[in-house]
């Protein structure tokens, strides 16, 4: 039953990808993600330039005037590498701020006649987004060490970790707007296997550049379907 709910929800979400409201959230998410990564890179460069002086004396070499340039270039390269791993977590967290738009579009087409969703205070939504971003980024940065230590299993670690995190967060966000936070946690515990499976399905394309930017939208739509279908059978 869980597998059928996951795949039927996923394909229903794919079928609505042409919705203009989906495109709007996608463009906003990409723009904000790029802006955040650029700001992080600029901040790292500024920190490097503050900590490194123009001239450094090294034994046997003497005065070195190019060390700050080397570290600045290295910092940019480090951020480019990290962005491969962080682009998706950051995009997912930012897109979660606009989940209501995606969920409203899904419900208007597939679940007409529903009452208006519970309003989520902006402060709560912002807090959830920041917490989600922090957990996603921290988990993916720490997982880089696991990818190196267990290289043959790196993809499975990536899928399992991000599948769990995406499923947990997106289902909760989709459910809160309809049944509140306490009931959302109850449903998440009851259907934890189905939710993790759906999250893993979202996580598989994360390793494919460009395609991974679509996953936050597809995920938000998929978990809106999953919530409604699980709530009906609960």
Image: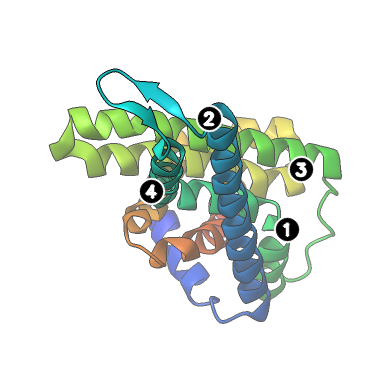
Instruction: Label 3: state its secondary structure.
Output: helix
User: Which label was assigned to residue 100?
Assistant: 1
Please say if 138 is above or below 101. Answer: above
Image spot of residue 109 (x, y percent): 66, 75
Q: Nearer the viewer, residue 39 or 211?
A: 39
Say if mark 1 contacts mark 4, CB within 8 Å.
no
Give 1 or 204, whichever is nearer the viewer.
204
Nearer the observer, disc 2 or disc 4?
A: 2
* Pair 1/4: label in front: 4
Distance Cα–Cα, label 1 vs label 4? 36 Å
Query: In the rendered structure, are the residues bearing label 4 and label 3 in contact, judged by CB atoms less than 8 Å apart?
Result: no
N-terminal label among 2 and 4:
2
For mark 1, give the secondary structure: helix
Q: Are marks 2 and 3 in contact (CB under 8 Å)?
A: no
What colour scheme does the image use? rainbow
Q: Secondary structure at mark 2?
A: loop
Q: Residue 125 has which mark? A: 3
Name the mark on residue 175. none
Q: Which one is in front, 36 or 187? A: 36
The local crowd at label 1, few if under 14, some if 14 to 19, many if 20 or more residues have their Cα within 10 Å, is: many
Question: In the rendered structure, are the residues bearing label 1 and label 2 in contact, judged by CB atoms less than 8 Å apart?
Answer: no
Residue pointed to by mark 4:
77
Residue 52 lies left or right of residue 131; in this view the side is: left
C-alpha span from label 1 to label 3:
10 Å
Seen at 59% across and 68% down, the residue is 26
In the image, residue 200 sits, relative to residue 218, either above or below, namely above
Please give the residue where the numbered disc 2 appears in the rendered image. 53
Nearer to us: label 4 or label 3: 4
* Residue under the point 29% across and 28% down: 145
Q: Residue, x 47% and y 72% (percent of image)?
A: 14
Alpha carbons under labels 1 and 2: distance apart: 48 Å
């Amino acid at each position: 039953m869980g597998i059928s709910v996951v795949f039927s929800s996923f394909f229903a979400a794919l079928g609505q990808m042409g919705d203009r409201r989906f495109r709007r959230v996608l463009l906003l998410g990409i723009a904000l993600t790029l802006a955040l990564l650029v700001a992080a890179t600029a901040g790292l460069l500024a920190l490097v330039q503050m900590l490194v002086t123009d001239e450094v004396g090294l034994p046997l070499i003497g005065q070195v005037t190019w060390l700050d340039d080397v570290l600045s270039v290295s910092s940019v390269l480090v951020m480019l590498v990290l962005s491969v791993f962080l682009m998706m977590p950051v995009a997912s967290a930012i897109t979660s701020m606009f989940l209501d738009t995606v969920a409203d579009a899904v419900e208007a087409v597939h679940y007409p006649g529903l009452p208006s969703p519970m309003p989520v205070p902006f402060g709560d939504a912002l807090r959830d987004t920041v917490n989600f971003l922090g957990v996603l980024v921290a988990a993916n940065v720490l997982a880089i060490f696991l990818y190196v230590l267990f290289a043959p299993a790196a993809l499975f670690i990536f899928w399992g970790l991000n599948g769990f995190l995406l499923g947990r967060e997106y289902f909760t966000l989709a459910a809160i707007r309809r049944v509140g936070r306490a009931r959302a946690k109850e449903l998440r515990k009851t259907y934890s296997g189905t939710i993790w499976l759906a999250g893993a399905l979202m996580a598989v394309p994360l390793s494919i550049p460009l395609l991974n930017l679509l996953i936050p939208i597809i995920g938000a739509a998929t978990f809106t379907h999953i919530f409604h279908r699980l709530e009906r059978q609960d």
